[in-house]
Amino acid sequence: MGVVLAAAFLLLLGATGWVVLEMRRDALRERLLFGLEGAQQEEREDLSAGDYGLRGPAWFFYHLSGFLSTWRGRVTVMAVGAAAGFAGALASGTAALPASGVAVASGFAGLAASVWLLRMRANARTQRIKRELPNALELLAAVMEGGQGFEAALSYLLREADAAHPLYFDLNVMNEAMRRGQRRTDALRLWAQRCNVLEVSDVTSALIQADISGGSLGRVLHHHARALFRDNEAEIQRRAERLPIRMLFPMLFTIFPAILVVAAMPSWLRVVRVLEQVLQGMRGL
């Protein structure tokens, strides 16, 4: 049994190492091309890179998303899931043939779980940006109406905002791009590219057009902020309208049985007692 557990552990460890090597394949290739000296960082990193500034889980899930977008990544994740399932089946004492079936199921389950997790994170990020975008635009417009320029208003907004929020994180990258000398229109396009949200793309398109034509950026920000506030209110109202239907099933399985017990139990007890009396009378006859 100890040999089987050791073999299962080594199999799982090897599959995990395979995933890490596949995810770092490009970096390793670059290091080999430069004589194993490591890729020297440039003085100014590429702000358009999707992983710029990402740390920890955000960096991991970004590269995992790119990894799963290739056939090699999907096959690798399935292989790791299959190895984990096979190792677990062997460790539990399952025979080799049933363990193979468990490995196949675990591989598909691992791939499905990874895709589902990435989609949930992407949807949560998009919703956070949509909810916070009108507040950021309204504050920007208010500061600009106070006599500040766009860059100064953006710097003030970023000083007061949560840097870990995905919207303000990308705005900070846009602000850094303008500090490095990029034109405002190019920085706005960079913001839309990094956010990858339709509402942000609409705002940046309007700001670029106003900047080129010499229009008022504050008015554009106010207009889009009010429109986004109305859209958020409409979405909240739609969710509120669907709430009674969603509450029907929890009430059916939680509150309704309690109501039946309180309302119908006394009558049911009376019926049972009457039936008992009738049965006793029939036995007496």
Image (cartoon, helix red, strand yellow):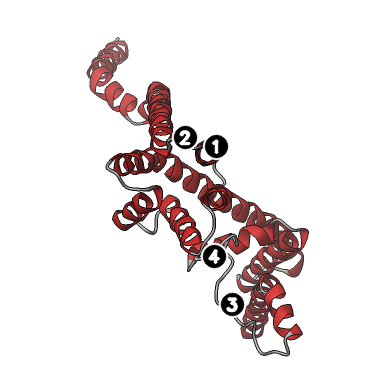
Q: Nearer the viewer, residue 19 or 93?
A: 19
Side of 137 relative to 68 (left or right): left
Instruction: State which mark lies toward you, 2 or 4.
Output: 2
Residue 20 horizontal/vertical position (percent): 64, 74
Marks 2/4: CA distance? 32 Å
> Circles 1 and 2: CB distance less than 8 Å?
yes
Q: Is residue 86 above or below residue 134?
A: below
Which residue is disc 3 drawn over? 42
- Circle 2: residue type: Gly
Q: Nearer the viewer, residue 132 or 67?
A: 132
- What residue lies at 33% left-to-right and 51% top-to-bottom? 157
- Circle 1: residue type: Gln
Residue 52 is tagged as: 4
Q: Residues within 10 Å of mark 2 (few under 14, many from 20)?
A: some
Which label's residue is closer to the chain start, 3 or 2? Answer: 3
Q: Is residue 127 above or below residue 275?
A: below
Which label's residue is closer to the chain start, 2 or 4? Answer: 4
- What residue lies at 44% left-to-right and 34% top-to-bottom? 220
Instruction: State which mark lies toward you, 3 or 2.
Output: 2
Residue 215 is tagged as: 2
Please tell me in which quadrant of the rendered image residue 138 appears: top left
Which label's residue is closer to the chain start, 4 or 3? Answer: 3
Residue 42 horizontal/vertical position (percent): 59, 77
- Circle 4: residue type: Tyr
- Circle 3: residue type: Glu
Residue 219 horizontal/vertical position (percent): 40, 32
Which residue is disc 1 drawn over? 209
